Structures are given as C-alpha cells and as structure tokens.
Image: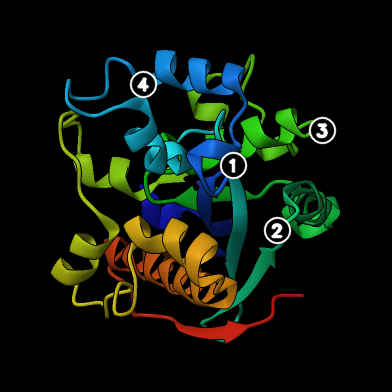
Amino acid sequence: MIQNIPLEKVLFLDIETVPQYGTWEELSENERMLWDKKTRYQRKDEISAEDFYERAGIMAEFGKIICITIGMLEKNDTLKIKSFVDHDEKKLLMEFGEIFNSPRLRDVILCAHNGKEFDFPWIARRFLINGMLPPTPFQMFGKKPWEIPHIDTMELWKFGDYKSFVSLELLAHVFGIPTPKDDIDGSMVSSIYYIEKDLQRIVDYCEKDVLTLANIFRRMRQEDLLQRNINLD
C-alpha cells in the first residue's frame, strides 16, 4: 500500500525538455534523415518531417533537458524544492547527479507523473548521451520490478487499466488541487525557450508541477496538501 511508503524517502521530480535545435535548418543532413526515419510512422501523410520537428522535445535522441526540479518533504509538512537549470545540458546533469551522493538519497524513491514512460528514461538516456553513467536510482538493468525504486502517479491511477491516460492537470482538478497550468503548459515550453528566451518562466512552471505532483500523491494517501518551500539544500 502506498500509505506504507516513507514519505521522507520520496523524491518528487519533473523535467522540461526542448528540441536540441531551435530550427529545422540547424540539423545536419544526417540528423534530418534520422529524424525522418524515426517519425515516419507517427506523422500523418500531409505532415512533413520538418513540420513535425517541433515535437523533437519529447524524444530523448533529438531533444535536451533544460530544467529538472526536485522536491522532498520536510518534517513540518512543507515541500522543499530545488531546480537544476542550464542551457548547457551536461552541466545541468552533472549538478543533478551530484545530489545522489548525499546519504539521505542513497535509498531514495523517485516519483513522477508518467515518469516510467518519460522522465526517468529521458534522464537516463541523456546522461549516457552526455558521456556519463545515470545515477543509481535510474539504473534498472538486472533488477526485478519490485526492486526498482520508482513511483508513477499515472500508473497508480490506472489500477490495472493499462489503456488509461490521465494528465497531471486533470488529476489536480479531480483532487481539488490548484492547477499548475495557470500560466503555460508543456506544448508552449519550446517556443518560450527558443523564441521568448524566458527560461525562468519555464522553471516556475516546472516547480508548480512538482508541488502538484507531491500533492496528488498525498491525496492518493488521503493526506493533507503540502505547502512549498523553495531552495532544497
């Protein structure tokens, strides 16, 4: 039962990703060919590979992470939040990876919404692409399913209904939690990053998602909502 999970061991997490390049023209000829092959069966006939490139931010082979926000519960029922943000993805990942040297995080349990399909594999793949091993909690090879320290709130909500999909925003609504999408949503991140060049706005959005994620998990445990406290040390 999720009520038996020690909350002080749970690290709530969300990432924001964008295409590796701001425009299609910046891709090499080989990258364009590989993108065309990768997306051929996902595109409708009338949509070209170039037009579809705006979705590169959801594919780890063609995107990059610009923000990772984490949150952990404190004894006074506040969620301490810290964001790792940088245009240089390798620097961001190196700083993020260092937190797992902390004694508190050696047996940490990762929690994200749709984390098993998106956040967790994305982080692991981008570590490898940047020439680094993923932190231990992201390494799954050779582990039995019950040995993998991952919680996915989307999976919890399915209750075995594997065809079901539910957004973080919808779960927030049904649980009476303030929406994290009061300014932007995920579809806007790439244009805000490359066109508006407003990285802080994206960070604010990511931090709202982490607070919402933690509160959804609390509601699933029939517990009170958390408040936020920025700057996790």
What's the amino acid at mark 4?
Thr
Q: Secondary structure at mark 2?
A: loop
The residue type indicated by label 1 comes to Gln
Residue 185, x across and y down, in percent: 33, 65
Of the residues shown, which amino acid type is indicated by label 2?
Answer: His
Task: Point out the frontmost of discs 4 and 3.
Answer: 4
Q: Measuring 78% from the left and 46% from the top, which residue is drawn there?
A: 90
- Alpha carbons under labels 3 and 2: distance apart: 18 Å
The circle on residue 87 is 2
- Mark-to-mark CA distance, 1 and 4: 16 Å
Image position, residue 92 (x, y; %): 75, 55
Q: Nearer the viewer, mark 1 or mark 3?
A: 1
- Residue at position x 23%, y 47% in the image: 157
Packing grade of label 4 (10 A; few <14, some 14-19, many >=20) is some
Instruction: Give the mark, 2 or 1, whose residue is nearer the N terminus.
Output: 1
Q: CA distance from mark 1 to mark 3?
A: 18 Å
As drawn, 232 above or below 41: below
Residue annotated with mark 3: 132
Q: Mark 1 — residue?
A: 20
Q: Check residue 149 in the rendering and tell me which mark sits there, or answer none.
A: none
- Going from the N terminus, do you reach mark 4 or mark 3 first? 4
Looking at marks 1 and 3 on the same chain, the residue that comes earlier in the sequence is marked by 1
Which residue is the site of mark 4? 39
